[in-house]
Image (spheres, helix red, strand yellow):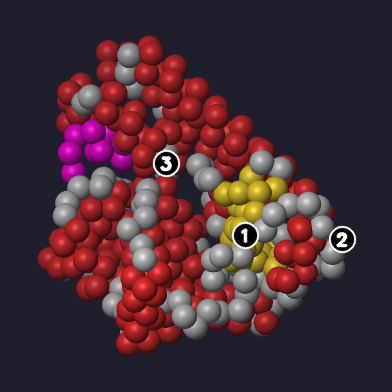
Amino acid sequence: MNDNFEAILRLTRAGVLRGPLCPNEGSRALFGRIDWTEVYRLAGRCGVTAMTAGVLSDLPADLRPPLQIRLSWEMSAQKCREEFNARHKAACSLRKVLQKAGCTRVLMLKGETLAALYPDPSGRASSDLDIMPLDHYDESNRAVEALGIDVDYSHSKHSGFRFEGQEVENHTPSPDWASRRNEYRTAELIGKAAASGKLQEGPCGYQELDPVTAAIHTLSHFAMHILLNEEVTLRMALDLELLLRRYPSVPDEWKDGLRYTGLEPFAAVMLCMLDKLFGEGREPRVVATKKRARDARSIINLYILDRGSRIQRLLVKYRYLPLSACESISLLSQKLLRRIRR
C-alpha cells in the first residue's frame, strides 16, 4: 500500500472505528510526506470523504491539509449528508406508497440498514435505494407506474425507477436461475430467512435481514462487483467490517450459507483483506496464509485502487468466484446473441 492510501486508512479508522490517528512517530512522518490533493481524491474514490472529514482537525496543526482542501473536504461531506437525508425522506415516502398498494412486507437491502452501523449514519455514501417487496413484487411496480413514473424492466434481478429524485432498484424475491450461483442462491437464502421469521424491523416501516443473511448478502454484493469489473470501494469493505464487529458470532454462523452460495473461498480471502485494512488493534479473523495474503493485496490493488492488469483480475475472479457450467453456457449464449445482433 502506498503512503496516500495508508493515510486514508488511518483517517478512516479514526473516523469510523475510533482508532488513534497518530499513535507513533511513524504516523506523524506519514502525514508529513503525503500528497493531500491525492489523498482527497482517494477519499472520494473510496467513498469515505464524509467519514473522514471530522478527524482532519485532530491532526497536529503542522500536518493538516491546506485550507482549500479542508474546505472542499467539508463541502463534500456536507453534500453526502444532505444526499443521505434526501434518500431517507424518499424511502419513507415510497414505503407509504407501497403500503397503500398492499405491499405489507418490503425489505430494505443495504442502504440505511448498513448505515446504522456507522457512528454517523449520514456519512455513509450511497447512490441509490435497494428494496425487495417479498410478497408483492408485481404490485409494487404497478403502484409506482400508477404515479406516472416509468419503470425499467431491462434487468433480470430488479426493476428500476426514479422516485423523488432518487434511483431505486426494486429487487425481485424470485431467484433468477440465469444468474450466477452466488447471486440466485443468496436470493434463496433471503427467501428462507423471510419464511422462517428471521427478518427484523428496519427504518421507515421496512424490514431488514438478520445479521447472518445480511453478511452473506453483503459479501455476495461485493463479489458481483468484482465479477462484473464494477467499482469497488473501501466503504463496501467497511460495511462488512462493521457488520462483523457488531455481530462477532457471524463468522461461525454463516458457514453453511457460504457453502451453499459457493462463497466460502472468497469469504476467507475477504476476511484476510479486512484484517489488513481494519485489523489494527483487534484479533485477526482468519489465518493469513501466503496465498490469502497475496490475493487480499491483489483485491485491494486491483479493485479498490484500480491498479493492475486485466489478466490479474481474471486470475483473482476465477480463483475465488468460478462459473458453473450453466453460467458459462449462459454467458457464451449472451456473447453469441450480441454478435448476431451486430
Of label 3 and label 1, which has the lower sequence position?
A: 3
Residue ID for mark 2:
100
Does label 2 or label 3 sit earlier along the sequence?
3
Q: Is residue 19 visible?
A: no
Q: Amino acid at mark 2?
A: Lys
Question: Count the marks: how many?
Answer: 3
Which class describes the residues within 10 Å of circle 3: few (<14), some (14-19), or many (20+)?
many
Vertical relation: 181 (above or below) 339: below
Q: Secondary structure at mark 3?
A: loop
Q: Residue 255: horizontal and vertical position, in percent?
A: 41, 79
Asked whether residue 2 is drawn in magenta, I would say yes
Q: Quadrant of the C terminus?
A: bottom left
Within 10 Å of disc 2 (Cα), the crowding (few <14, some 14-19, many 20+) is few
Query: From where the camera sits, is residue 106 visible?
Result: yes
Residue at numbered disc 1: 152
Q: Main secondary structure of the magenta part?
A: helix
Q: Which image quarter: residue 171?
A: bottom right
The one of 169 and 73 positioned closer to us in this rendering: 169
Query: Which segment did they paint magenta?
Result: 1-10
Q: Residue furthest right?
A: 100
Q: Residues within 10 Å of mark 1 (few under 14, many from 20)?
A: some
Across and down, in percent, residue 90 comes to: 71, 45
Q: Of 220 and 246, which appears nearest the observer? A: 220
User: Which amino acid type corresponds to the residue marked 1 in the rendered image?
Assistant: Asp
The residue at the far left in this view is 290
Amino acid found under the numbered disc labelled 3: Gly
In the image: residue 90, left or right of residue 158: right
Q: Nearer the viewer, mark 1 or mark 2?
A: 1
> Is 331 placed above or below 307 here?
below
Where is residue 128? Give x, y as percent.
57, 49
Find disc 3 in the rendering and name its residue: 47
